[in-house]
């Protein structure tokens, strides 16, 4: 019984590592699309094309993201904002956005 539990825990841990790896690939694709948007102006179209492709859907699924049209639109909006993923995921950026939202809600 203990071997089964140890094996299940190991497999779960390996799966979590693999999911993180694929999530990193998604973040890299977003950064590439943002760079394309700044350089060529076609970033949202690039990320949409990738996310709708067979490889893109597979990577999104392996990252634990359901590859549906709502997700594609969200990725396009994210790329359209032009904020790099490392900045968007930082604590300072999230605090700044929360402060802006608080100001907007007070003004309304």
Image (spheres, grey):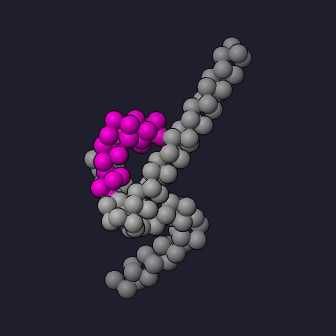
Relative side of 48 to 59, left or right: left
Q: Quadrant of residue 30?
A: bottom left
Asked if one can make out residue 74 in the rendered structure from this viewpoint, the answer is no
Quarter of the image that includes the N terminus: top right
Residue 8, position in %: x, y?
A: 62, 23
Q: From the image, which quarter does the C terminus lie in?
A: bottom left
Q: Main secondary structure of the magenta part?
A: helix
Residue 57 visible in rendering: yes
Q: x, y percentage for residue 28?
A: 50, 51
**Closest to the observer, 43 or 6:** 43
Q: Position of residue 19 (x, y in %)?
A: 53, 38
Q: Which residues are magenta?
A: 44-68
Res 78 → quadrant: bottom left
* Residue at the spot 44% in from the left edge and 62% down from the top edge: 35
- For the point 32% across and 40% down, the residue is 53
Tell me if residue 62 is in the magenta stretch: yes
Farthest residue toward the top? 1
């Amino acid at each position: 019984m203990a071997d089964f539990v140890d094996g299940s825990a190991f497999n779960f841990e390996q799966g979590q590592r693999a999911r993180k790896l694929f999530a990193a690939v998604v973040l890299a694709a977003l950064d590439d699309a943002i760079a394309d948007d700044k350089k060529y102006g076609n970033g949202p179209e690039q990320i949409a094309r990738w996310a709708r492709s067979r490889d893109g859907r597979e990577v999104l699924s392996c990252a634990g993201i359901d590859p549906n049209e709502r997700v594609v639109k969200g990725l396009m909006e994210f790329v359209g904002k032009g904020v790099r993923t490392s900045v968007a995921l930082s604590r300072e950026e999230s605090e700044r956005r929360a402060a802006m939202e608080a100001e907007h809600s007070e003004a309304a």
